[in-house]
Amino acid sequence: MSVKKKPLVVVTRKLPDSIETRMRELFDARLNLDDTPMTPEQIAEAARTADVLVPTVTDMVREDVINQPDCKLKMIANFGNGVDNIDVAAAHARGITVTNTPKVLTEDTADMTMALILAVPRRLIEGASILTEGKQHWAGWSPTWMLGHRIGGKRLGIVGMGRIGQAVARRARAFGLQIHYHNRRPVAPMIAEELGATYWESLDQMLARMDIISVNCPHTPATYHLLSARRLKLIRKEAYVVNTARGEVIDEDTLIKLIEAGDIGGAALDVYEHEPAVNPKLVRLARAGKATLLPHMGSATIEGRVEMGEKVIINIRTFLDAHKPPDRVLPSML
């Protein structure tokens, strides 16, 4: 009796051990044990040999990879919620199924967003560095030293009121922030009432009135530089910008110039327009206490990464069983 051949699944980065072990059990899995990012040439080669490719959000699977004459892929099971690293339209046209891992990262990313909302006004990183980096002597408590700004009562403007935006709103409301938001369409009345959220159809009008702006929308062609140079100039001088979504949503160069000029109060960023490169001017602003910078840590919890891997496995197994994967992504959804 013949044994059915396992499908070849190429995984581009190191995943949690429990996920890799399960993949080895279920598939002919080629793992990346040393976690060295694959080059574009290696990704192209994987597309020519694998049945299923499991990229991460930093692995570019573009049209030229998908439309290779000898591309063998039947499925791209993204290890991540965003799919801006994949040409979904090209994959769909070629009959390649694309999936992602939604919902599992919501709470973790919202936690980090709330941490950044607190960090800039209260100068947390700046204060910690005084003790850990020894740049100046700490003489003890003083009534006028290291003063920041109160959070309670301030207006928070959320750009993108999806799952993460709503989770941020719930946390922020507990801190006494007034919740405002811009979205393609208003959320359900019951959700708006629960969050005490005010909807702004005009992003321009909302930006001009907020104390803190939190970017929580996905990166799509429609949201590239959604916070453009023109819109950034609408933001109040005392306001802060927080971004845990995608760096491409903000015109980073203009944001830097406005902070340097004192026309925006500061920024807290977990993502950058040209990742993994970080603009040296942002680093200088961080050293001056005008920015808080993190290395794309928003969803970085053990629990979240394991749940992402479990979703990838479920999507692959469902697809291989000739059923519709639960997290399929179509061009019309973007």
Image (cartoon, grey):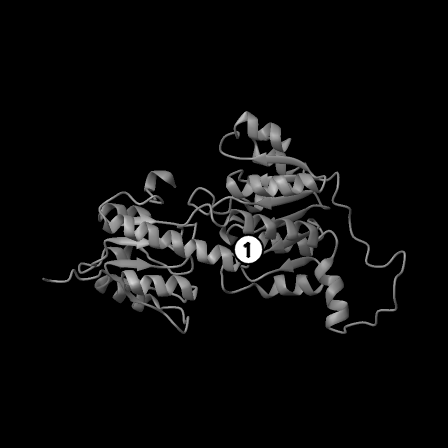
Residue 167 to residue 295: above or below: above
SS at mark 1 in the image: loop
Residue at screen point 34% across, 59% down:
54
Q: In this view, does 188 lie to the left or right of 87?
A: right
Residue at screen point 50% across, 30% down:
185
User: Which quadrant would the C terminus be assigned to in this image?
Assistant: top left
Which image quarter: residue 141?
A: bottom right
Q: In this view, does 299 lie to the left or right of 318?
A: right
The extreme front residue here reads 1
Residue 147's x, y, as percent? Answer: 82, 54
Residue at screen point 31% across, 65% down:
24
Q: Nearer the viewer, residue 13 or 254?
A: 13
Residue 29's x, y, as percent? Answer: 29, 65
Which image quarter: residue 132?
A: bottom right
Neighbourhood count class around disc 1 (C-alpha, 10 Å): few under 14, some 14–19, many 20 upward: many
The answer to whether residue 330 is seen in the rendering is yes
Q: Which of 326 and 72 is in front in this view?
A: 326
The extreme left residue here reads 1
Q: Nearer the viewer, residue 4 or 133?
A: 4
Q: In this view, does 333 lie to the left or right of 168?
A: left
Exactly how many numbered labels are in the figure?
A: 1
Residue at screen point 37% across, 64% down:
20
Residue 296's x, y, as percent? Answer: 53, 59
Which image quarter: residue 256?
A: bottom right
For mark 1, what is the residue?
298
Residue 18's x, y, as percent? Answer: 41, 63
Q: What residue type is labelled 1?
A: Gly
Residue 107 to residue 302: above or below: above
Residue 296 to residue 235: above or below: below
